[in-house]
Amino acid sequence: MNSLVLIFLIFFALLFAGVPIGVAIGGAALLILLIDPSIPVDHSFIFQSMFVPLDSFVLLAIPMFTLSGAIMTRGGMSKKLFDFFMYFIGNRAAGMPCAVIVTCLFYGMLSGSSPATVVAVGSMTVPILLEMGYDRRFSVATVTVAGGLGIIIPPSIPFIIYGNSTGVSVGDMFLGGILPGCVCAFFLMVYAYFYCKRKGEDRERIDEHVRNLRARGFWNVFKESFWALLAPVFILGGIYGGFVTPTEAAVVSVVYALLACVFAYKSLKFSDVYEILKSSAASIAPMLYIVATAVMFGKVLTFMRGQDVIADFLANAFDSKVPTILLMMGLLLILGAVMDELPLILVLAPIFNRMAVMLDIHPVHMGVLIIVTLTVGFFAPPVGVNLYVATSLPGNVKFIELAKAVLPYLFMFVIAALIVAFVPWLSLALVL
């Protein structure tokens, strides 16, 4: 028990000292072995355990979905989607920010990444929102938070990580995230509606923008957005139609993205592919290193029986399921605000999966609940990745300003997470 407490103290000490997350995780596991020689693990086993998990067919989906998302981002697919949704709801109250949220929701099906969604959708929509007279902090905050939908709506890299860590079907996890993602998007749109009602909108400029869009005709707008709209149907339909596995679908998504952007939209040249590959590799390598060290950390915890101890403590902390789930969500919200999501999933997923068995919670529902709750960490200060990414968007919003502007959205997202937690049907309706 003392060693279990010590390994987490070492980890957080390294983390708050500014050590990179992957090094902090691996360093804590190695240091505890030096401090406590009674743990029956040698260093050769530790380093071997870092590499063996990466030799995984399931994890191959991560670099492939990351690459396809980068291709679609560079190819400008987000603009096609935004115009399509603006055509229908742009002239309604809060229609423009709601179109941004729906675009983020839909684009998440293409990228599987929250920061990528923020960059792809935000760089295109924020200038339009500013031109239409919306407050710059509200405009950037909308994209910052809505970008979090990219990891709830399939295909989702965190869902792949969770499924690989717990043995839960990745396909079931993808299905389980669809309705909760829509619920989260709905609550974000509710706040955007009341904000626009309270602050007002420049209806003259907005209506003129929508008229110009509609003057192009529905058929032309639909033709321009067709390949972007078809992408999730093509990719996810292949999975649920039984034609491909999630990993094979990731490879298909890369081929589809290239064909759509190079030949259909002609927004990419083959000469751009090298730069896309290079930038994708730069983001994939740290991600896989974190996966390797987090798996190694989890193996050390297993030998220390740490996962059983923590799961038993949390499951037995209260007499009923409700306060236990609230405690778990509170823990995830706190950790998600100071740590990256992927190592948290890798370390905590086996623990909470044991809790799911003890509390009679379906493993898919538990997985979706974990991901939805951790999503708040993407835009919650002080570590929220989306906050840092969004400060580079048009509008020049400073970090502190943006952190304040996202708080109402954060509150609405937490409400949505509580509904997902206590209405299991949302996660299981498409699975069972």
Image (cartoon, rainbow, N blue to C red):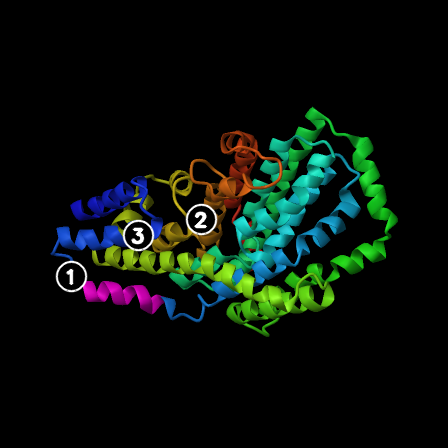
Can you name the residue that lies furthest to the front here?
271
Report how far apart the C-alphas of labels 1 and 3 lie in the structure.
22 Å
Percent x, y of residue 148: 54, 46
Which amino acid lies under the numbered mark 3 shown in the image of this protein?
A: Val
In front here: 8 or 228? 228
Can you name the residue that lies furthest to the left here?
37
Residue 172 is one of the magenta-drawn residues: no
Residue 49 is one of the magenta-drawn residues: yes
Which amino acid lies under the numbered mark 2 shown in the image of this protein?
A: Ile
Q: Tell whether 19 sits left or right of 93.
A: left
- Which residue corresponds to mark 3? 23
Seen in the picture, residue 148 relative to 252 is either above or below; the reply is above
Mark 1 or mark 2, earlier in chain: 1
- Which residue corresponds to mark 2? 370
Give the numbered dot on residue 40: 1
Q: Quadrant of the rendered structure where residue 51 is?
A: bottom left
Which amino acid lies under the numbered mark 1 shown in the image of this protein?
A: Pro
- In the rendered structure, which segment of residues is drawn in magenta? 42-53
